[in-house]
Amino acid sequence: MKNISFNQKQICKLFIYLSFLLFPFQNLALRISSSSYDLTAIILIISIFLFFILNDFQKFSFRKKIAIIYTLIFIAYYLLNYILNYKAPLGRFFASLLWLVGLLNIIILSSEVKINQRSIFNIINLLLILICVHIWIEYFFVIGIDDYNTYRKARSMSFFAEPSYAGLVLYAASIGYFFIFLLRFNINYLLLFLLNFVSGYITLSLHIVTFIICLLFFTVIFFFAFKKNINFTINLKFYLYTFILFIFFISFFYYFKSGDFFNHFISRLDIFNFENITNVSLLCWLRGMDQAIASIHKSYYLFGMGLGSTGEFPFYSEFGNKLESYGLGTLTLKDSYSLFFRLIIEIGLLAVIIFLVYLLYRLIHFYNFICRNSSRNKAYIVFNFLFGISILIGSLLKEPNFSRSSLYISLFLISSINFDSKKIKIEN
């Protein structure tokens, strides 16, 4: 077989750009039985697979050979696990196997594609503006202010499957714009930050928690990076703008603290008042945690219950009993309401720890990159990484679906960015 040609490479890249263009359009997902499969996830898997196979095995890079080895080990182990410890229907097992193999290969191989990160940044910017405009049109004209949040899903969600996914993407974008504003002090990034943050708030998504966690975490990282290697003038601006923006957040939350929106969030975050919890979303999340803890014990702490096993084995949960009493015993039972919980249940604690170590490795590379003065001229790299990892953090907290576009683009962005300045110039 001949080496992959220039045209074939370009076709693969065009498919990847197409997958990013389609990522907000979860309403176009393929629906099979009770499951939905986003077009972005399907196209990204196909693109990476094509890029992988259209090459001479003799000239495969080390990374591609590693991908083959890891994929074969992954498939062999979980097939054996399924045969010996049947826990899930065959359809659920193969669905989980397909999506997780796809995600594994995106993590390993996406950097081989050498996609133009500036182009991805431009695509995301355009889509985010479109999403924000659509969110406000829904708020004012489609749902209406008077009927907003008065019945199920009477909340803005643009083209996403749920308001939660819309909120996740908008809050993740807010994190990206916030920090590239602090890098470049460009008023346009500040305006985009405000637009995305307020639009995210309008969705009433609980991913405002994701936003707060990411904001605090990355503020610490940028503080140490700026302190280490950037001149006093930039440091002073960083501290000043950070202080002003934190005052803005405090004022914003104080202003809205007595409104219906604020009460909506508080009812879903009272996790320590166990006896009096009545919010269904919070009960589902806590039951997912119970299921994850039970799976750790049942699988001898390391290897998980097997692919597709979420919700397919008995476990005790006081919160599950409460849901049963409401007639909602099966609600989110088979996805555990959190990607973190679902991964622990299906692939085990050991694999999850390895994954978290990989994320730490990428964060260290990111930290070293922003320590360099040159990072100020590569704001699109900083945005793409922050956007991707913020979506992933939000997914780990409360978005368990393996086939959602947001999960795929986040892992692609985290894994595909090369923080080497010389290679960035070549790729862009």
Image (cartoon, rainbow, N blue to C red):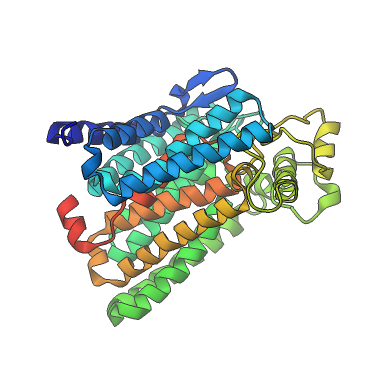
In the image, residue 310 lies at what x, y percent? 67, 36
Q: Quadrant of residue 122?
A: top left
In the image, residue 270 lies at what x, y percent? 74, 52
Q: Quadrant of the N terminus?
A: top left
Q: Quadrant of residue 243?
A: bottom left
In the picture as drawn, the residue positioned furthest to the bottom comes out as: 232
Q: Going by the image, does 37 lie left or right of 295? A: left
Q: Going by the image, does 399 lie left or right of 281? A: left
Q: Quadrant of residue 148?
A: top right
Q: Residue at x 33, y 42 (%)?
A: 124
In the image, residue 289 lies at what x, y percent? 71, 48
Q: Residue at x 29, y 37 (%)?
A: 52
Nearer-the-camera pick, 91 or 289: 91
Residue 425 visible? The answer is: yes
Q: Going by the image, does 220 lie left or right of 44? A: right
Q: How many marks?
A: 0
Q: Residue at x 29, y 77 (%)?
A: 230
Q: Residue at x 86, y 50 (%)?
A: 275
Q: Going by the image, does 303 lie left or right of 244? A: right
Residue 191 visible? The answer is: no
Height in image: 368 above or below 187?
below
In the picture as drawn, the residue positioned furthest to the left comes out as: 6
